[in-house]
Amino acid sequence: MNAVQTYRYLAPSTLAQRSLALQTSGGPAPNPRFFAGFLTTGQAAAVGLLAVAEVARTRYHRPVSPASLDPVVTGSRDRLRFESFSGCCGVYARLDVLPAGLDGDLSEHGTTNVDVNTPLREALARVGGLDPLHLSVGPDDLTVSTLDGAVVEKKVPLPVRWLRGFAEVQVLAARFEPRAELPAAEASTFLRRLPRGSDRSVLWVVPAGRSLRLTSRPVAGAVCLAGAGRLAALQPMLRFAKTLRVYGPTVAPGAAPAPSVWELDTGALRLSLTLSPEPYRGFSGEGAALAALAGDDVVDDANLVSALLSWDPTIDPDRLAEQAGIDAGRVRGALAQLRATGSRRPRSGQTGTPG
């Protein structure tokens, strides 16, 4: 079931003279500014942003018209994070701009939606190799005070499945371990050699020297690759990457299909795709968070943990458990409750997700 939410932007997002202004909607303030400064690897950052936006527009299972949903941006002390789900909710894309990629001030923390419109996508595609890219996430104060009557209002279906998907991805990824790390050249070769027509099939990969080997059956140490065509959004970023890391849960012979994470690391940026266990399955329906939400005290625990977090962008379940006087399992259940209700989007890198 979809609800409708009105996203209010003070103006369209723009890219002029290589200065990228991403307009925001919602967050710790009505239209917060999370960052103002340069991205040190402008072209790579532009490519990564386009990848996240492209996943948001794509339905990989039974492709139809573009979904065109606005990606989510989170500001924290040490990074900017852009996230989206595909229209079918079976692919979760994330771009982390790390400290090495930021030359400016992170002035706010919190989570909001950003407007990545068609003109902006076209402008990002024109950013060249040495072009500087200045990023302002949210309007500056002067602009806000002088834009009376210039508010851009858009009505879009609220992706409730995104809220469920965020919760599911975090619970699932908490069980993941690093399974393989490939240099960029080997990663490019592996992705290029994936069999055609595998977009809807479930394959498995196992480390083989400096690369990966495909297998049709799960074996110890294998990682599930469901719908290999869903990795296409990584391709443009390969030329900037140093490594490809692959994460997944522990599997045994005969195991059922499982989700996996495929992460390209440039040093300043990390672009990752999390794939659902099968191409037709969306994360919003996986149900992994249900067990975490089943405890009698989970709502009270969530209220307590939310007060302790107080918009702290770094999540340490053990520290929260000590502060709250409850065990770490109940803390994780409380965090799952907060994610499932959309009450707060903590920085997920501290709750088990790779990266």
Image (tube, grey):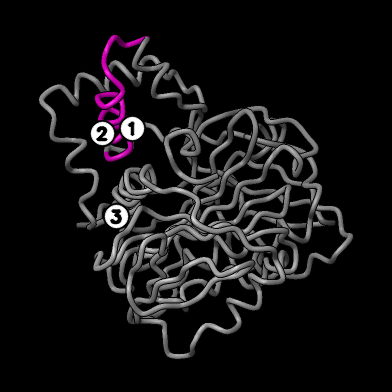
Q: Say if mark 3 contacts mark 2, CB within 8 Å.
A: no
Q: Residue 229's x, y, as percent?
A: 47, 78
Which residue matches tag 3?
Answer: 161
Mark nearest the camera among 3 and 2 is 2
Q: Kindly report the distance in space between the C-alpha atoms of the residues bearing marks 2 and 1.
A: 8 Å
Report how far apart the C-alphas of labels 3 and 2 lie in the structure. 15 Å
Residue appearing at x 54%, y 47% in the figure = 9
Residue 124 sits above or below residue 270 on the image: below
- In this rendering, position of residue 17 left or right of residue 165: right
The mark nearer the N terminus, 1 or 3, is: 3
Q: Mark 2 points at which residue?
A: 337
Q: Nearer the viewer, residue 269 or 102?
A: 269
Along the viewing direction, whichever of 177 and 99 lies nearer the viewer? 177
Q: In this picture, is 172 found above or below 75?
A: below
Q: Is residue 246 highlighted in magenta?
A: no
* Residue at the farthest right position: 130
Identify the residue at horizontal 50%, vertical 46% (top origin). 354
**Magenta extent:** 323-340
Label 2 close to label 1 by CB (< 8 Å): yes
Numbered tag placed on residue 343 in the rendering: 1
Q: What residue type is labelled 3?
A: Arg
Local crowd size for mark 2, using a 10 Å CA cut-off: few (<14), some (14–19), many (≥20): many
Residue 127: give x, y in percent of width and height: 79, 65
Sequence order check, earlier mark of 3 and 2: 3
